[in-house]
Amino acid sequence: PVEAALDPLADEVIDELEAEGSAGTCDFVEKLATPFPMAVIAWLLEVPRADWPVLFEWTNGVVAPNEPEYQRPGETPHETRLRSSKALYDYFDALARERERGDGDDLVTLLAKARVDGERLPPHILSSYYMLLIVAGNETTRNAISGGLQALIDHPDLWDQLAADPGLAKDAGEECLRWTTPVVQMARTATCDVELHGQQIRRGDTLACFYASANRDERVFADPFSFRFDRRPNPHLAFGIGEHFCVGAHLARIELRAMLRRLLARFERFETAGPTERLQSSTTGGFKRLPVRYRFRSPGAARA
């Protein structure tokens, strides 16, 4: 099962930090939240480890082109997004052509060999799908993990509760998703005139759907501005809704649960170790840097 396969991937990422010492400080985003989703997506796509850094750079350029450090000199945000998107398209187009001649069982190979009504999928469709997997599978899950960890740092009693009862990981993961809401908003175009809560919306109007607001709707959630594990059900919209529901929602959920389980099993606690830095993006909510102080549990407890 995929869920059982993810714990060892999480442990591999954590092992790299433990090799630096049993206690210390680090940027949680850089050391743990970023490499784990990338490792999972790379495992599914069989992307070479040497390519992870450049893929991460390109995905950042797609979702946060306003960030100066992701731009080249003289670039506008629009140009940054276009350059990064094209680089991803070109990368996966070349990879799919190579894999089509092989006999692997990774997703790149399976899709490259797929036929619909006897016809190969068009290259731009294939590349778009690969880009969706690598961008959405990397950025949003990374931000859910970072945001969830920050919430647990802010609520040490819930860290203790979760450590004492790992069976709460599912409920904790859902609350991390609601609380963090990695996708802030998406734009939609009205297809007809409609009145909604007294607001007249005309056909052709562009609307911004703010999921973060929906996930704190007092009409849906009791005490919406509190971080709690006892929300059952927890009907958050972190993965969208309807035909716009996230294709990777199931994978993201089990990734988040896997990382929570392994963090709780292997670390005594995390504390804030410096100023955090939020990602400058109108669509993606999360941390660019999250300095933390950590201490590992004893090796025996860690692998229990």
Image (cartoon, rainbow, N blue to C red):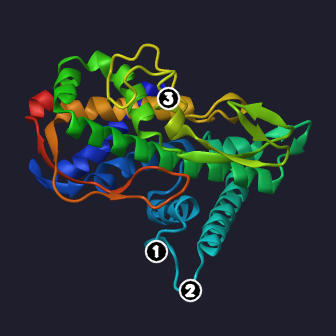
The residue lying toward the viewer, choosing from 22 and 61, is 61
Under mark 2, the amino acid is: Gly
Residue ID at (33%, 35%): 259
> Which secondary structure lies at badge 3?
loop
Q: Describe residue 243's horizontal placement relative to residue 232 as left or right.
A: right
The earlier-in-sequence mark between 3 and 1 is 1
Most extreme residue toward the top is 232
Q: Label 3, on which residue?
A: 217
x%, y% of residue 68? 46, 74
Q: Describe residue 211's horizontal placement relative to residue 224 as left or right.
A: right
x%, y% of residue 110? 69, 41
Q: Describe residue 10's horizontal placement relative to residue 120 as left or right.
A: left
Q: Label 1, on which residue?
A: 68
Q: Label 2, on which residue?
A: 74
Distance of label 3 from label 2 (alpha carbons): 41 Å
Distance of label 3 from label 1 (alpha carbons): 33 Å
The residue lying toward the viewer, choosing from 33 and 171, is 171
